Image (cartoon, rainbow, N blue to C red):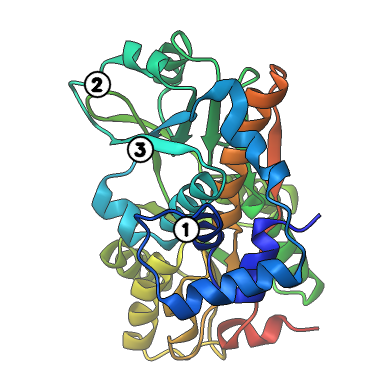
Amino acid sequence: MTSIREIARKAGVSPATVSRVLSQDKTFSIKDSTRQKVLAVANKLHYDPRPNRLLININNKKRKIIVLCALSIEQLNRDLYFSNINRGLQEEALANHYEISSFIHFPKPDFIFSNVKNFDGVIIIGTFTASFIKRVSLYNSNIVIIDEYRHFDKFDLIRNTYSDFTNRILNLLQERNETNIGFIGGYINEMNQTHLSRKSNLDPRTQAYETWMKLHNLPIKEVLTNWTLEEGFSAMKQLLSIENPPKVVIIASDVLAVGAYRAIHLSQKQIPADIEVVSYNNSEVASYLVPSLSSISAPSFEMGQAAIRLLHDRFVNHRTIPYHLLLPSKFIERESSAKTKK
């Protein structure tokens, strides 16, 4: 059966565009040539719209979703990982005729927890306190949490495999007999209704690094800081100043890596000849740095899509058993870690 996503891929447009063209949405502004291209591809693939009406006709109403986000608008737009999650949410909801009718950024002191009962489903992005999540669940049990690495046995969780890839990179370095490995990471503080709490959780990348180094009886050389360019710069300066500084540094985000690059250049060291760098998120800047930055990429867009699909499964099949999805990441190797190649 031909899907909206297949038509979108063939026509070179988004699934949301295909959905609105095929549903004859008169409020949708689009070039006539693009509209005709979508219709031509749909006709060529013998698209049958009837199966896709399932989502529209559930209980004869349009399902409404509320999103609770632990990041500010500025943080969400600035961070490619989270902005791609949001884009996946929005496009998948539109393609399936769901409405994200409320998107709330925290902290928000005037947030009324009981209001979530007015929505069919709740999507939570980022790290909130356990008590916050519990209060939300009192009013709505259809909850999907994205980018959550603590254990919750009552909610759907969507995660990446950054922890697994940290171990893979470390194992690969060990095979090369490279064990002088440093790490720059960030704190993950828990958000609640009114403020960012002081309680912080170890990022799974940090946990993986520390566990692996201890397991192999190697010295931990890490700096944990905030997630900014300036902090990345300061953290790398700190690592470079210690006795026997690391030959390889794993950095928890491309943003931190940009600051770290500057510190390395100012120290007159060369990448990767003197120090190798591996990062995470594979943002656009990674390929433009000199030398280009090796980075681990998470399927963040697909994580957003998956959240909508999990809610759909709860709506349609009345599923109550929670699903915990682990979406695989991939390593984009570039010049900053050229020596990691076998």
Viewer-nearest residue: 341 or 83: 83
Give percent across and percent down for residue 143.
53, 24
Give percent across and percent down for residue 203.
51, 44
Q: Bin the neighbour count of mark 2 within 10 Å (Cα to Cα): few under 14, some 14-19, many 20 and up.
A: some
Q: CA distance from mark 3 to mark 2?
A: 13 Å
Which amino acid, by three-letter code, is at mark 1? Asn
Whether residue 57 is visible: yes
- Residue 84 has which mark? 1
Q: Mark 1 or mark 2, which has the lower sequence index?
A: 1
Which amino acid, by three-letter code, is at mark 3? Ala
Q: Bin the neighbour count of mark 3 within 10 Å (Cα to Cα): few under 14, some 14-19, many 20 and up.
A: many
Who's the residue at 32% across and 43% down the image?
A: 71
Q: Which residue is mark 2?
A: 111
Who's the residue at 27% across and 34% down the image?
A: 106
Q: Bin the neighbour count of mark 1 within 10 Å (Cα to Cα): few under 14, some 14-19, many 20 and up.
A: many
Residue 40 vertical position relative to residue 18 in the rendered view, above or below: below
The outermost residue toward the top is: 138
Q: CA distance from mark 3 to mark 1?
A: 15 Å
Whether residue 157 is visible: no
Q: Which residue is mark 3?
A: 70
Q: Mark 3 or mark 2, which has the lower sequence index?
A: 3
